[in-house]
């Protein structure tokens, strides 16, 4: 009986690997569309709401990597990059309002 369980488990794991699902690697964005006559920064927040704590102020041109392929109620979860070539995923993470980020296209 234990042998049959192992075969069943191996078959299930094999099928899970063939499902076509893949991890999201993130897309690169940059802070944009800020009002230079206003605060001229985008708040990086601890969650997707203006009532959440501000972690950091992001200036125009700050590069970001998205953590999910979609917005959640107008917010995107991101990782702050040191520069355009930083793909270390080691930066500060948080949430930004999606209206103020633009996708970087190569």
Image (spheres, helix red, strand yellow):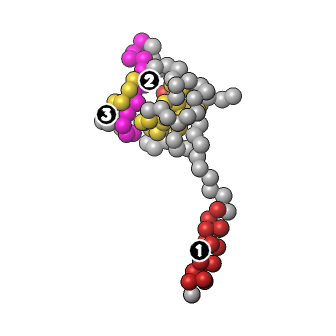
Q: Main secondary structure of the magenta part?
A: loop
Extreme-front residue of the structure: 3
Provide the residue designation for mark 2: 58
Give the residues in magenta: 37-48
Question: Which tag is nearer the camera, tag 3 or tag 1?
Answer: 1
> Any mark on residue 53, and which?
3
* Residue located 61% across and 68% down the image: 13
Classify mark 3: helix, strand or loop. Answer: loop
Q: As drawn, is 17 to the left or to the right of 46?
A: right
Vertical arrangement, residue 81 with respect to residue 23, above or below: above
Q: Residues within 10 Å of mark 2 (few under 14, many from 20)?
A: some
Measured in 3D between alpha carbons, the distance from the residue under mark 2 to the one under mark 1, in whole angstroms, is 48 Å
Q: Is residue 61 left or right of residue 35?
A: right
Q: Which mark is residue 9?
A: 1
Q: Is residue 61 above or below residue 94?
A: above
In this rendering, which labeled residue sits more in front, label 2 or label 1? 1
- Please determine whether, in this image, residue 1 is positioned above or below residue 42: below
Q: Position of residue 100 (x, y in %)?
A: 48, 27
Q: Position of residue 61 (x, y in %)?
A: 53, 20
Instruction: Find numbered disc 2 in the image and state the secondary structure of the residue it sits on.
Output: strand
């Amino acid at each position: 009986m234990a042998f049959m369980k192992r075969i069943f488990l191996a078959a299930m794991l094999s099928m899970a690997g063939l499902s076509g699902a893949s991890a999201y690697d993130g897309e690169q964005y940059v802070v944009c569309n800020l009002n230079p006559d206003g605060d001229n920064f985008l708040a990086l927040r601890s969650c997707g709401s203006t009532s959440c704590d501000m972690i950091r102020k992001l200036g125009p041109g700050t590069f970001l990597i998205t953590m999910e392929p979609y917005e959640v109620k107008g917010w995107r979860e991101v990782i702050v990059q040191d520069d355009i070539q930083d793909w270390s995923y080691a930066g500060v993470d948080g949430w930004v309002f999606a209206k103020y980020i633009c996708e970087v296209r190569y």
